[in-house]
Structure formats: C-alpha cells, structure tokens
Image (cartoon, grey):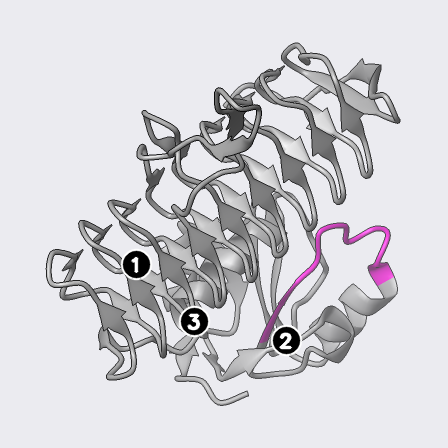
Amino acid sequence: MDTKSVRVSAIAEALGAPFSGSDQVVNGIATLSDATAGTFAFVADPVKYADSFLAATARGAVLLVPIGTGVSTVGEGALLEVENPRGAFAIAVAKFFVPVIEAGISSTASVHPTAQVSPSAYIGDFTVLGPGVVVGDSAEIRHHAVLAANVRVGEGALIKSHAVIGEEGFGVDKDPDGNNVRLPHLGSVVIGSHVEVGNFTTVCSGTISPTRVGDYTKIDDHVHISHNVQIGRNVIITACAEISGSVKIGDDVWIGPNASIIQGVVIGARSLVGIGAVVTRSIRENEVQFGNPAKRIRDNHRPKE
C-alpha cells in the first residue's frame, strides 16, 4: 500500500511505548506472517504464534508486542512493547498509514442553508444535510448519506455511505375511526464525538427528545436503531442488530450480530448480548446473555474503565 514513511521512534513516541532494535523507516503495514523489514505488524500472543513471531523478527520486521515480551535478539527489526498490541496497532495505523481525507463539501452534496458544517469536516458525494444539521470538527460524512432535520454529529465522527440518520421512527397509533396514523417524531438525533455509524444503518429520530449515541460508540453496517433509544459511551453494536424504541444501553456494552432487543428494556453497563439473541427483559450490568429468549449465561468479567 502507498503510505508516507515514518520511523520506529515516531511510532513509539505516539504510542508512549519503549522500543528495542533498529530505528528503521517503516513504509507500510503487514500481517504477522508476511511482515518483513520496513513493515509494521502486531502479535497479541507471542507464545501461541511463536513460529510466525520469531520468523518476522528474523526478517527485520517492526512488531508491536505485549509488555514483557523478550527475544534474545531482534536482528535488524524492532519491538515496541504495549499493553494491548491490537489496540495500539489500530491507533498507529490510523495516525500514520490511513490516507487523510481532505476537508470540504462535495459539489454533488445537498446542504440546507441552515445546516452548519465545520470547516474541518468532510461531506461526500450526493449526501443530504437537512435544515438545522450540525456537523462537528473533523467529522466525515461519506457518500449518499442522509441526515434529516436538526441532527447533530460530534467531533471526529464517521458516518459511512448510505446511512440514514434522523428520519421518523415507526410510531403508529389510531385515529377516531380506527385508522392507522403516524406519530410525528420531532426530537431528531444526537451523535457523539468519535462515533462510527455503518453503511446502510438507520438511526431514527426521537419522538420529542433526541435519540442519542454516546461518544466512541461504534455501530456496524445494516443496524437499525429506533426512536428514543439512548446509547452510552464505548458501545459496540455489530451487523444486523435491531434496537427497538426507547431502549437504554449502558456504557461499554457489546451487542452481537442479528440480536433483537424489544422496546423499553435497559441493557446494563458492560454487558454482552450474544449473536442472534432476542432480548425481551432488561439485563443487569456485567451479564452475558444468549438465546431466544435471551437468558443469563454468566457474569461478564470486564473491568469497569
């Protein structure tokens, strides 16, 4: 891949990580099995992947390793010791190897005159920003996305292509003649800082108050989030999950693929909802639940951050 060059010492400084070995120039990233001199990779478990780890070291690769990892020699390569090699790899790659998107608004985008877009944000091709939309600093709204009236997007957020945010939720009631009528939804949506919303994902407007997505939450592709949902910080919601209206999701929750959550329940902080689970009752903090209907399997022993 084409990237700028960066020295090992610069990566180490950015991560606050000590390094040993060669302060070589790094030109790209690689998998552990393919890593050679001039490339950057990580190993989460040097014992489990000992053969690949030692081979990459012998080839002179630059590797992120767990704190306390030691080899007799790193040859022409380099080792950077970090607490979480995979997480550190993500941070370093984002900083040094991902192409920078230039700020600006595409000529094909439709931006309402009352929308406010930070000069450092990016608005992609054929994206629509409705009246009163606010897009924060360094946010990236990709192509063919729709942000309806009064949606707010925080600093550094990423809205991927074809996402729809802030249009009406599915609220239906009856008129005096017994006909179905739509319940208006005027609360819009607030997307926090450094949130990611995936391709073809929908986040519906709140009825009166906003639907909210907390800072650093990551939402996969093809997810549906209904009206009035309140999502905390650092939540992960994976592909094809469905979150019904007025659900409250605590911080650091993980929701598996194809999970369905009935309206109005509370998902406690640091809980885990398994793949395909159907949640019909609230879940306490630090629980793991699977199945249809979802049932407690065990505690989730994730530390409170």
Q: Is residue 31 above or below residue 302?
A: below
Which badge, 1 or 3, is on the more N-terminal residue?
1
Q: Which residue is mark 1?
A: 139
Q: Position of residue 69 (x, y in %)?
A: 68, 49
The residue under label 1 is which amino acid type?
A: Ala
**Residue in view at x 48 percent, y 59 percent:** 163
What range of the chain is rendered magenta?
40-50
Q: Position of residue 27 (x, y in %)?
A: 49, 84
Q: Position of residue 284 (x, y in %)?
A: 66, 10
The residue under label 2 is which amino acid type?
A: Ala
Q: Is residue 78 above or below residue 45?
A: below
**Frontmost residue, 209 versus 232:** 209
Instruction: Tell me the element at label 2.
Output: loop
Measure the C-alpha gap from mark 1 to mark 3: 16 Å
Q: Which residue is mark 3?
A: 144
**Frontmost residue, 232 versus 184:** 184
Closest to the camera, between mark 1 and mark 3, is 3
Instruction: Tell me the element at label 1.
Output: loop
Which badge, 3 or 2, is on the more N-terminal residue?
2
Instruction: Tell me the element at label 3.
Output: loop
> Can residue 11 be seen in the rendering of this structure?
yes
Closest to the camera, between mark 2 and mark 1, is 1
Q: Quadrant of residue 271?
A: top right
Q: Which residue is mark 2?
A: 61
Q: Residues within 10 Å of mark 3 (few under 14, many from 20)?
A: many
The residue under label 3 is which amino acid type?
A: His
Q: Are marks 1 and 3 in contact (CB under 8 Å)?
A: no
